Structures are given as C-alpha cells and as structure tokens.
Amino acid sequence: MNHEAVQNYYGEVLQSSADLQTNACCTPDAVPAHLKPVLGKLHDEVMARYYGCGLIAPLALEGARILDLGCGAGRDVYALSALVGESGAVVGVDMTPAQLEVAQAHRAYHAEVFGHAAPNTEFHQGYIEKLDDLPLKPGSFDIIVSNCVLNLATDKAAVLRGAQRLLKPGGEMYFSDVYADRRIPEALARDEVLYGECLSGALYWNDFLSLARGAGFGDPRMVESRLLTIENPELERRVGPIRFLSATYRLFNLAGLEPDCEDYGQAVIYKGTVPHAPHEFVLDDHHVIETGKVFPVCGNSWRMLAESRFAPHFQFIGDFSTHYGIFAGCGGASPFNGLSPVAPAASGGCC
C-alpha cells in the first residue's frame, strides 16, 4: 500500500472516528483517573479526528521531550503536553496535511487551557519511514510514542531504525499497534479499506519482535494486549481466519541487552514515588512491582530501570559480578531443564 492511499483514507474518506468501519483503530481502553481531566480539556475537533488503538501515556513524564509518530490531529500530542509540563516538549510528525491542519490550529488553545506561557508543542509534515529527512536531532528524545500507526507504514523496519536513532540512551519507544497471528497475504495487503482500518498492514507479531531487535531494541516488552473483534461482517469475511490484537510495547534504547533473561542475583525495591503509581509500578505484563517489596529481576529488567528515567524511583540490589544462568520462569529454555544426573558410559564419549 502506498502513502497516497493512506493519506486519502485519513484525510478525505474519514472525517471523524464515526466513519471507521471496524473497531481496530479505536479500541475502548479504560482511561486512568489522572488522565480524564486532561482529555476533558482537549479541543472537540481534535478529539473527533482521533483514530488510535490504545492509550499512549507512560508514567514519569514531567520535563520529558517526546516525539509522536503519526500524530494525526494531535490528540496524544496535546494530552502529553499537559503531562510533560512547561519544562517538557512534545513534537508530532504526520504525513497527512488535512490532519496536521487541525493539529496546528489548536496549539495556542491547548497552551492556554493547560496554563503554559507558550505552546510546548510543534508539528512536522513528513513520513515516519524517513525521519532522517526531518529537522529532528539524533539522540534528542526521552520517549517516542505512536498510536496505531506502525501498521500503516510502508517500511516498518525503517520506522524502528529511525526511532532508535532519535532516542537518548536509556530512552524508550512506547507505542500501541495492531498485530496479526500470521503473515498477511499479499492480496489482503493491497485492500485499501482493510489497510486503512489498521488490519491488513499489521505485522505478524513474531516478525515485529525480529524487526525491533534488528533496529537495536533488545528484549522488547509487551505492556498489555487485547484481542480485536472486527464487528463488520463483510470485513470479517475478507480477513477469514486471521486473528488480530491491539498491543502496547515498550522498547528501551539500551545497548547490549541480552537475548534472554539472565540471572545475576539482582533485585529492585520500588519507592512508590512515580506520580499516579503509589502502590505498584508496571514495567510490562509480567513485572508488576509492589511498593517497598524486594523484587528479584533479571539483568535486562535491572538495566531498564537503572539506566532510564525510572532510576530515581528504585533502590537497586546487586550488580553483574556473578552469573547464575537463565532467570527462572522468565528466561529462555535451558537444555539442562528436565535432565537428571546419569552415570558416564564405560567407554567412548564426545565433546
């Protein structure tokens, strides 16, 4: 699918979220209590042109510099602009002029409603597959977000490589997208409606993991996911047995993360100091860390917390001086699993 077809679908065919033919681009995630007042202040026109598939609002954002890939009419940009405060900044990139026209028109409005002396937002027209062509400095962003847009990209690997280049060391890409349980057949990938509805451009989930690692994001972490129901009989018939899910991933820009979860005897203690998370901190879908409790972690998880913006909120136990093998219950399968000691053979052997 080419850029022109996507631009036409989101700039001309869709005039509001009510024009979508499936629920893939607008799954109804529950909104955390602290975000409801923020969303309530967004301009009505911006909210009407929202086509996201998840809620892109990681924690600990005060003062952060954030890039939104495929920002559309600016819904997430403006919500995040309130959360980063006047000392932070949010930059949006989109290829669709009609969407950016809506976003640009409301910069002053949102600065005023959030009490900022001047807008802490900016927008650029361009392709997320060609981030190097935009006036964005490498290594200048703390966080990169994207909301149901990677599936629309014509070169998904290029998007991930560009994002990794723009992130600071220890920064993260935190984004939601649609994934398929198998590779999409070429005939479906050419279907403009299915593509525009965030389905036929979806990556096979295992291909996504490979692309992320190849772009420099070792150990991708899923935060949450849900199966999608298309709820459109004609489009359900077209996709056949293929299943889709909406998932949020976080990819940390940390050099040298290991392929598997390795055990170094480390642990962390969460201090309960991240705003809006006094009782527990959610790193991903299998690391929910209670406040004040010693929580054993693998080396990768230790680094994700120790070498990122989350470091001040944790106490760190251990180092990398002693290796104990695969982290039990989390790391890759060991060839030693299930083996019991046996007596050596009387003769013969191998290396």
Image (cartoon, rainbow, N blue to C red):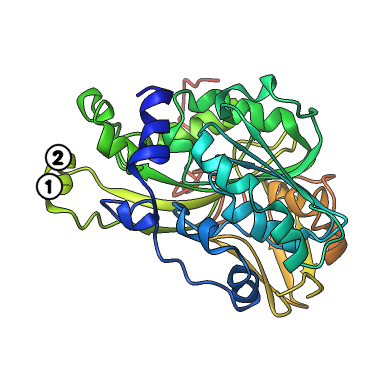
Question: Does the residue at mark 1 contact the one at mark 2 (Cβ under 8 Å)?
Answer: yes
Residue under numbered circle 2:
238
Residue at 78% x, 78% y: name it: 292
Q: Is residue 196 visible?
A: yes
**Disc 1 to disc 2, how far (Cα)?**
7 Å
Reading the image, the residue beneath label 1 is 234
In this rendered view, identify the residue nearer to me: 46 or 205: 46
Lateral position of residue 91 relative to residue 243, left or right: right
The picture quadrant where one finds residue 284 is bottom right
At horizontal 69% and vertical 57% (from top left) the residue drawn is 80
Amino acid at dot 2: Arg
Q: Residues within 10 Å of mark 1 (few under 14, many from 20)?
A: few
Above or below — where is 297 with respect to 288? above
Percent coordinates x, y for residue 56 in the rendering: 58, 56
What percent of the width, then of the height, locates residue 129? Answer: 56, 24
Would residue 349 appear left or right of 12 to someone viewing this image? right
Mark 2 residue element: helix
Q: Amino acid at mark 1?
A: Glu
User: Viewer-nearest of labels 1 and 2?
Assistant: 1
Q: List x then y, in percent, for residue 313.
A: 83, 66
The answer to whether residue 221 shows anywhere in this view is: no
Residue 123 vertical placement versus 73 (above, below): above
Name the spot of residue 177 as percent of width and height, x first: 46, 46
Q: Callout 2: 10 Å neighbours few (<14), some, many (20+)?
A: few
> Which residue is found at the position 65% from the left and 32% from the top?
163
Q: Above or below — where is 312 with respect to 4?
A: below
Q: Is residue 232 left or right of residue 322?
A: left
Which residue is pictured at 81% across the width and 73% down the height?
273
Helix, strand or loop status at disc 1? helix
